[in-house]
Each structure stands twice: as C-alpha cells, then as structure tokens.
Image: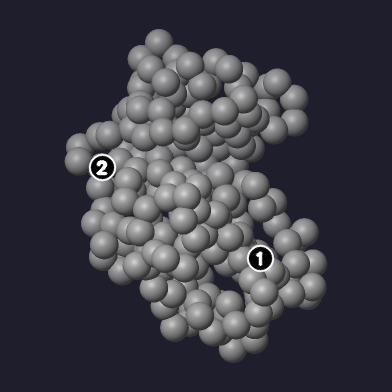
Amino acid sequence: MGLLSSLFGGKKPNYSKILSNVDSSGGRGVVEVAYEGFCEHLRQHGSVLKEDHSSITVEVSHEHQAVLIFLDRVGGANECLLEMTVVDYLDWKDPETAVHLSKSFDRFIAGRDDAIPVVCSIYIFGTNQYRHDTQSPFSESTAEEPEALKAFLSNAFTEYGSLTEEFSSMLKNINQREVMDFLEGITVRVRDPDLRLQLIYRIADAVVREHSLEEL
C-alpha cells in the first residue's frame, strides 16, 4: 500500500506521514492526531462508506485500486485507531476474494484463542446484517456455509442458535465491535444481501481453515 503516500500530499504532509507509517507497520496502528481533523481530511479525499459519532470508513480510489481506510476514535480527542486495506475492485463472487480479505483479520488474531471469537463475530455480523437488510431470516438466503465453517459452527453454536458457554466466554479475548465494524467497512459495497452473506461466510471459512478451527 505504498500508494497511500501519494494520495494525501499537499498542504498537510503530516497526514501522509501518518498513513505511510501505519502502512509500513502492517496497516493498523494507534496514532496521535485530532480525530475530527483527520475525518475531515478523509472526507475531502475519499468516498465515505460509513460514519457514526466515533468512527468513519472511507474508500479512496487511485490507479484502479480501492483503499479502504477505517478510523476509530479511541482514548482522548487526539488518539485514533487507523486501519487500512486494499480491495482492488475485487470480484465479490470469486472465492479467492474472501481468502484475500481474510488476511486483513490477522491484525485481530494473536493466536488460536483469538481466531475462534473472530470467526464467531464474523458469522454473527453476517447473519444479523442479512436479517437487517432483508427483514428475513438468514436461513432463507441462497448463501451456503462452506464445509470448514460448517464444522466449526457445529461446535460453536447450540441447536437453538446461540453460542455455547465455552465459545461465548472467549469473546472477551477480542474487541468484537472493532472486528464487526471492520467487516462492515470492507463488505459495505456489496449491495446484494445474498452475495454479501456468501462473501462473509467465505471470509469466516478462510480464517477457520487458516487456524485449523474445524478440528476443535
């Protein structure tokens, strides 16, 4: 993502430097900068996909690439969590797209005990988002759960559709809101609810396979 340094030049080179530093450190970091000022800068240079009182997701296009920037207000007024990922105008129907996007979740995963709640959070967001978008149960979707994810879910959820006590207790290992907000940001451009849910299933499946979670 070295291209980021060329996107945010001009009168405020500090923003360019911040993005370059986060880029070189893996695409995620806490930065000391005024949240409101950074938001305004992002609005001027990109297309806002999602914004609320404490976070903003912006897409920036450059040389046939799309860079998603997620900025979250943390700590005081001058401290922000900044995350970046390149999505390259991907083919949302291609299973390899999900594999590519799943790598972005490595930032939330220090080990297997983090991967488990991350997959749960991805799955829960996907099914809830489908219900929100369609006003229909996700069981009516044409999206299909891949085999590795299906095996994981059989251990993680009870027959009544709730997380088991063991898996529910593991959610404290991660910042679930952060994971879900990031997932929303990288999938919000997928307008078809069934396709979006299929993509999310595949992202979760890729994380399951990466960490051999189907073997729990």
| Crowd band around label 2 with a 10 angstrom C-alpha radius: few (<14), some (14–19), many (20+) | some
Q: Earlier in the sequence, mark 1 or mark 2?
A: 2
The figure's colour scheme reads one colour
Q: Please name the residue shown 74% across and 74% down the image.
A: 164
Whether 9 is drawn above or below 85: the answer is above
Q: Please name the residue shown 37% across and 53% down the image.
A: 193
In this figure, what is the number of numbered marks? Answer: 2
Q: Please name the residue shown 64% across and 71% down the image.
A: 161
Residue 131 picture location, percent across and down? 50, 53
Residue 121 picture location, percent across and down? 61, 60
Front-lying residue, 156 or 96: 156
For the N terminus, the quadrant is top left
Residue 180 picture location, percent across and down? 57, 50
Front-lying residue, 122 or 135: 135
Write down the residue under mark 1.
Answer: 117
Amino acid type at image mark 1:
Pro
For residue 213, which quarter of the picture?
Answer: bottom right
- Judged left or right of residue 115, residue 144 is left
Amino acid type at image mark 2:
Gln
Q: Which mark is on residue 92?
A: none
For residue 3, which quarter of the picture?
Answer: top left
For residue 76, which quarter of the picture?
Answer: top right
Q: Tag 1's secondary structure? A: helix
Q: Which mark is on residue 65?
A: 2
Residue 125 seen in this snapshot: yes
Whether 129 is drawn above or below 31: the answer is below
